Image: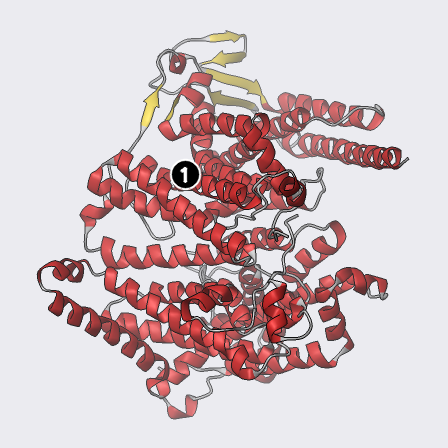
Amino acid sequence: MVDTTVQAAEAARGERRAHRLGWFYIGLGLFVALVFASTVTGEGDSSFGMVLARDRFADFEIGLGSLRLLPSLVVPAALTNFLIAAVMGFLGARLLTKKALKPSNLTLALVIGLFLFAFLTWAAAGQSFNLASMLRQSVLRSAPLTFGALAGVLSERVAVINIAIEGMLLGGAFTGVIVGSLYGAWPGVLAAIITGGLLAWVLAVLSIKYKVDQIISGVVINIFVLGLTSFLSVQILTQNADLNNSPRIGAWNVPFLSDIPFFGTILFKQNLFVYIMFGLVAVTTYALFFTRWGLRTRAVGEHPKAADTLGVDVYRIRYIGVILGGLVAGFGGAFFTIGQVGRFDENMTGGRGYIALAAMIFGRWHPVGAMSAALVFGFSDAIANKLGILNTPIPSEFLAMAPYIATLIVVAGVVGKSRPPAADGIPYEKQ
Amino acid sequence: MSDKDSKETTDRKPSTMDEITGVGTSWGRAMLVPVLALFTALVCGALIIAVSDLDLLSLWKSDPGLAASGTWSKISGAYAAMFRGAFGDLQGWSETLTLAAPLILAGLSVAVGFKAGLFNIGAEGQMVIGGLTAVIIGFSFDLPAIIHVPLSILGGFVGGFIWGAIPGLLRAKTGAHEVITTIMLNFVALNLLTYLLKSSAIQQPGRDDARSKLIQESARLPRLLSFMDDPRLRVHLGILIALVAAGVVYWMLFKTTLGFEIRAVGANPDASRYAGMNVLWLYVAAMGIAGGLAGLAGVNPTLGLQYRATPGFSAAIGFDAIALALLGRSHPLGVVFAGILFGALRSGGQEMQAATGISIDLVLVVGALIVIFIAAPALIRSIYRVKTDDVSVSITKGIA
């Protein structure tokens, strides 16, 4: 009896979501048709560079008439966008009409991807710009966000809210550059990882042992790290420039794979941190969902009392989750200094820890979801930098806002609800 | 909060409200943790000063005596300069009160949120929107000061109110957690500010960088000590606005039906709903008022000091406000004292940086440490082996 009502409620909620998503797709399709397709004027071919100038197949050509694929993808802008709008409308109508259809995340990702492509086609109409280079930048910029979001996932799966990602990134960046300058890049990375772990340990002690409100401890850690790194960077780094000059860990081309046109450029001509990002996402997903530790971790996050009753050490699992997250975030922090510029500047993470938090929510507390969200946010970051070239009417500030507004929409439940682990934020009191 | 500890001090289990406000405890007990927290944070700050001087550090090996005296003189010099800058003379007091005003207002904003059981991390964004609205009114109209000043201030309040009411509405309508929505709205507000400051309607003509037009002289907050004819005495109407706001917030929270309902929702939203209160409206009202107060905080640097809006005018006051509200235990009077303390830290920090070259960022660290010790009284208990009331705050229950 109870089961059937629960199932009915579940089904009703699923149907509501399907309806809302259906209308959302149709709305997006209309937007693409009315704005992106209709306002394209004149000579409306959009040309996307698909290879970098230094790529092996840079002068290779594939194409049919005016449609060309290599070395640039040339498409008629208005027609392409009308087609995209039609596909979106079809997907939306399908959700609205077919009763039993469950909205899939794959379709959602497809629609978001199509929307972004429609935007680019519109922005690049009558011009050319290098798609490969921009996507490569997107992946690169999403790396620190992914590490931060993974830290959030690991910590919140054991029900400890982690607002302190920003502080962990910044702390890792700072110690990374100092130890890196003294002992070399890899010891620097190690120091960054340890710093992240230490900060996470503080967060864990405050929220698990002392049961301090987790958001307060997180915010405080952020202020503390921002203050301390800025203070030390003024007091120490300005006078000792040799302490602020770390060797870098830069790009590494995967042999053979990096020669694949377009995809090789985007995925396999990357910074080492990017490869580690993909590896870490895979490992975390496997560990969380296919191992005994992962099952316990998720149980502790959803229903700590039940886990405790079955003999799981709730506190231990929580400490492990939070500190593992800290180690990952510290590594992500090293990306800012050792992975990129090799020097530390005050507040150089600039709120990316909060975007990582948004990516975690957007990705529904799942490693792969978090990475996908981080990729979208990295994309909006990269495009904001390229907008000047395309002279579109959209100010770059609005693109910088996009991740935050997207998160607002998601947490408000407009596009499907993103549900945190049930015990998130609640200290566990052993009885 | 463990039951055992609270039973030792009071007979009944204190509610969350009591723990935040310190209701039902004696003054001495209520003050013990904040005072010890401040002291401990200053000691930690001294340690940080000591280890951040590499020359002194290397001296410890060769000549510990000299190193010890050098470290001591450095620390005492820094704190002496800090005290001098905060309370040493009239200018110190003036600066302390000038900087305290927005802190008090933003702290009140967070405190009102706490009372309603909401965690307003968005004071920063609400400050930005409020301050910007005030500036726009400040340069757009040409009115006599007696109308223009109050109108601009009101504009600041309304701007903040609207920006604050959005997360309240989202929380009430969709259950979206205000911590996430206010953080996101902070960034939206900051980006919006940079964009608007460069738009032709607002940007100062002839400039490429992001800064607004100057406000009319009639919209400037009058300086309180202008009769002394010393441009360094910057204290302006803002501190009076802050004090009046604290009084009004006290009255609103404890003497009106609205305040009672806000506190009731904070203590137990379900019970309030069953008692027939309109929880949706109360969330919107509480967050709106909180946002309005933060908007008034944004009025301070814009109408009172810079006479225009610049990208960084909110100066992270919205984040210090969280510390303030905790330190003042979300009570308007407590927030006023906490605000003056933080204003003193900031104004003393300026003097410390000028006199001794030690970066003012130390103040951020000290502020963060104060909050850690206040939010985790068990830490203070174990350091000093004293019995304190448990004031740990637990107001947030899960995100989203």
Q: Nearer the viewer, residue B151 or B290?
A: B290
Q: Tell me the residue at 59%/39% (across/down).
A: A312
The answer to which quarter of the image holds residue B182 is bottom right
Count of labels shown? Answer: 1
Residue B74: x, y in percent?
A: 21, 71
Element type at mark 1 = helix
Q: Identify the coloring.
A: secondary structure
Quick one: which residue is furthest to the right in this view? A1
Residue A138: x, y in percent?
A: 47, 31
Q: Nearer the viewer, residue B339 or B306?
A: B339
Q: Chain of mark 1?
A: A
Compared to residue A252, the image places residue A18 above or below, namely below
Q: Tell me the residue at 64%/40% (across/down).
A: A307
Residue on which the image places disc 1 = A332
User: Badge 1: few (under 14), some or many (20 or more) residues near its Cα, within 10 Å?
Assistant: many
Residue A14: x, y in percent?
A: 79, 33
